[in-house]
Image (cartoon, rainbow, N blue to C red):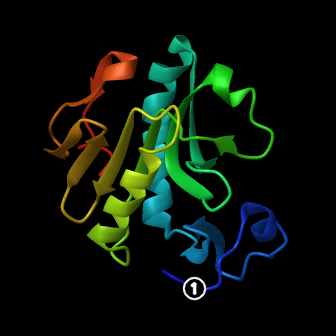
Amino acid sequence: MKFVSALFTVDELERIPDPPGGRYELHHGELYFKRFRERRYGDIQRSLRDLLDPICAPLGFLADTNYPYRPLPESELWGADVACIRRSRERGVEKWLIGSPELVIEVKHPSVTTHEVHAKAMLTLCGEGVVAFWAIDPETQTVTVYTRDGMQRYAASESIPIDFLDCSICLAEIL
């Protein structure tokens, strides 16, 4: 949800306290208010992290929730609902990851438009390090996977490949 029209830098965002009921992200230099997730969406995020963690850990990756990253410098500061990031990159993070995690997963809330999710995917794919952006829609039981090569939609019951981890997962039990 767009909040104000003045342009901000990440340094300026740091000095603005988060409002009650949510937090701010910086999109194209504009403040966006992001509400705290309802329990259902938090449960999906944790379940995804718990599913990915045993796959990621032995391969040198971290699976985490609400992971802050800056796909482009200065005017962007986003939060991944779920992220997978190479531990060697994660160790170098002081505040926020510069670039994008290797896998960014957004659990779509009904208040977020498809256009907003698509725009976030496109900007995330501009960040260094990213391999894929997933948009999970619990309402339609679908997963849209964005890569630099294109977009693919899956039913939650289908096997969804994670090429950089050389595996695939099925999300039907989570959703």
The residue shown at (20%, 56%) is 141
Outermost residue toward the bottom in this view:
4
Compared across the picture, whether 66 is left or right of 148 comes to right
The residue shown at (44%, 61%) is 41
Q: What kind of element bears circle 1?
A: loop
Outermost residue toward the top in this view:
58
Compared across the picture, whether 54 is left or right of 168 comes to right
Q: Is residue 108 visible?
A: no
The residue shown at (47%, 50%) is 45
> In the displayed structure, would residue 41 be above or below residue 122?
below
Residue at image mark 1: 3
> In the displayed structure, would residue 97 be above or below residue 24?
above
Q: Residues within 10 Å of mark 1 (few under 14, many from 20)?
A: few
* Image coordinates for residue 64, horizontal then vertical, percent: 58, 40
Image quadrant of residue 132? top left
Image quadrant of residue 154? top left
Compared across the picture, whether 5 is left or right of 106 comes to right
* Image coordinates for residue 19, horizontal then vertical, percent: 72, 81
Outermost residue toward the right in this view:
15
The residue shown at (34%, 46%) is 134
Image quadrant of residue 171? top left
* Image coordinates for residue 68, horizontal then vertical, percent: 64, 50
> In the displayed structure, would residue 148 be above or below residue 134?
above
The kind of residue on which mark 1 rests is Phe
Q: Work out whether residue 97 or residue 81 is closer to the camera in this orientation and state it.
A: 97
Q: Is residue 52 visible?
A: yes
* Image coordinates for residue 11, horizontal then vertical, percent: 80, 63
Q: Work out whether residue 99 or residue 65 is closer to the camera in this orientation and state it.
A: 99
Number of disc labels: 1
